[in-house]
Image (spheres, helix red, strand yellow):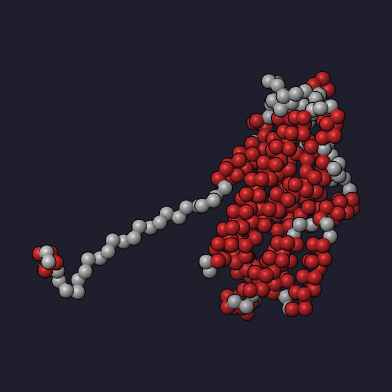
Amino acid sequence: MTEKELFTMVGIRPEPPAPKKKVRRLSGFPWISVILLSLIVLCCLFAEVIMTKDPSYLDLKNFNVAPNAEFLFGTDTLGRDIFSGIWYGGRISIMIGFLATVISTFIAVVYGSVSGIAPQWLDTLMMRFTEIFLSVPGLLLVLFLQAILGQANVLTLSIVIGVTSWASIAKVIRTEVRQIRNSEYVVASRCMGGKFFHILGRHLAPNFIASIMFMVVMNVRSAIGSESTLSFMGMGLPLEIISWGSMLSLAEKALLTDSWWIILIPGIFLVTLLMCLTNIGNYLRKAANRKESNL
């Protein structure tokens, strides 16, 4: 035995070194999607700084012009500058997606929470209505409501898309609320006279917000896609209101004149935005699933 071991006091042992804390990395975080989405949104918000021409000006001398030094993305069949229209129209499309998502999320939160804390008979009735609502094709509902409201604009289209896309989120919220409605803090708040919206904002929403976050992001994607689809079909925004969907509505004329840039460039921006939102939504869904599995 060594001299150090002989004179070691009994009962006293050297403390092992503290384990190094592992740096928690965001594995699989969609950095590229976040960066691309941020760039597109910022450019659309500051469109006036980026635009080289008036996006609504009809330059009949320069219609169907291919991309060049003056018209970076070319012009459409009406002579409008596509480069300026991309940023200005993108702002309209993103605005519709955001407003429609706010409307649908608000309806879903209120409806799902009411169903979650309601008696069994009322909850069953509300869920049957939700299932019937989901069985009707969304595009058919949008067209029906838009026909009632008349000429489409940014506000009416946002309302129509919003009131037809709440049901899936409401079902998730209802399930989460049913699990926590008898918790001590919820019961105590109700006994002390807490109103519905107080209980919802203070006790219920913090418990289900993480579960629906990815669905909210997906709703933004779906709303932008719905606006583009309706405008492409000629049933959405009119041509004078520039959006990515209304720009794509000129596809038929572009194909007849072999003007590929009129379809390709707005299509690339639209698909890129939707793919970025999809990747971010999938990451949020996986993060929520990991959190639930660790509980």
Residue 6: x and y, percent?
11, 68
Quarter of the image for residue 204 reads bottom right
Q: Is residue 99 visible?
A: no
Q: Which residue is at a point 69% across and 38% down the rendered structure image?
A: 269
The image shows residue 91, relative to residue 71, as above or below, that is below
Quarter occupied by the N terminus: bottom left
Q: Which residue is at a point 69% across and 74% down the rendered structure image?
A: 117
The image shows residue 81, relative to residue 46, as above or below, that is above
In front of the other: 244 or 23: 23
Residue 232: x and y, percent?
82, 41
Horizontal relation, residue 6 to residue 116: left or right: left
The image shows residue 52, relative to residue 291, as above or below, that is above
Quarter of the image for residue 56 reads top right
The image shows residue 254, relative to residue 285, as above or below, that is above
Q: How many marks?
A: 0
Horizontal relation, residue 5 to residue 156: left or right: left
Residue 95: x and y, percent?
71, 45
Quarter of the image for residue 205 reads bottom right
In front of the other: 41 or 248: 248
Q: Is residue 263 visible?
A: yes
Q: Which residue is at a point 55% across and 62% down the rendered structure image?
A: 290
Horizontal relation, residue 19 to residue 155: left or right: left
Q: Which residue is at a point 62% across and 49% down the rendered structure image?
A: 279
